[in-house]
Image: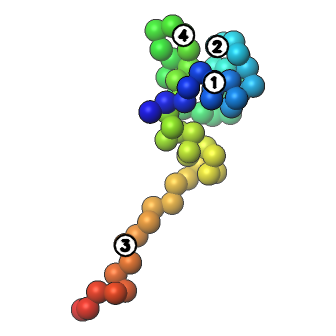
Amino acid sequence: MILSDSDLKDLTGYVQKAAQIRWLIARGWKFDVNSAGRARVGIAEFNRKMVGGKVAKQEPDFSQLNG
């Protein structure tokens, strides 16, 4: 899944594709560029950046197992 064009505009504050790409590069976002020259940002990258660069891995809770 990727951010929509509208989401990308909301995120960067820019409509022009070149300005969006400059914004993403300046802030270290990972993205691809499609054949039309538009930036494509994955939802996973959006989530990674918005939670401070790391997604916490959850360990299973084994406390309820009988050992």
**CA distance for labels 2 and 4:** 7 Å
Above/below status of 19 relative to 23:
above
Disc 4 is placed on an element classified as loop
- Decide: marks 4, 3 in contact (CB < 8 A)? no
For badge 4, the amino acid type reads Gly
Mark drawn on residue 37? 4
Q: Which residue is mark 1?
A: 6
Q: Which residue is mark 3?
A: 60
Residue 60 rendering spot, x and y as whole percentages:
37, 72
For badge 3, the amino acid type reads Pro
The extreme bottom residue here reads 67
- Decide: marks 1, 2 in contact (CB < 8 A)? no
- Decide: marks 2, 4 in contact (CB < 8 A)? yes
Mark drawn on residue 17? 2
Frontmost of labels 1 and 2 is 1
- Decide: marks 4, 1 in contact (CB < 8 A)? no
Q: Residue at x 67, y 20 (%)?
A: 20
**CA distance for labels 4 and 3:** 43 Å
Question: Looking at the figure, which quarter contains the C terminus?
Answer: bottom left
Sequence-first tag of 2 and 3: 2
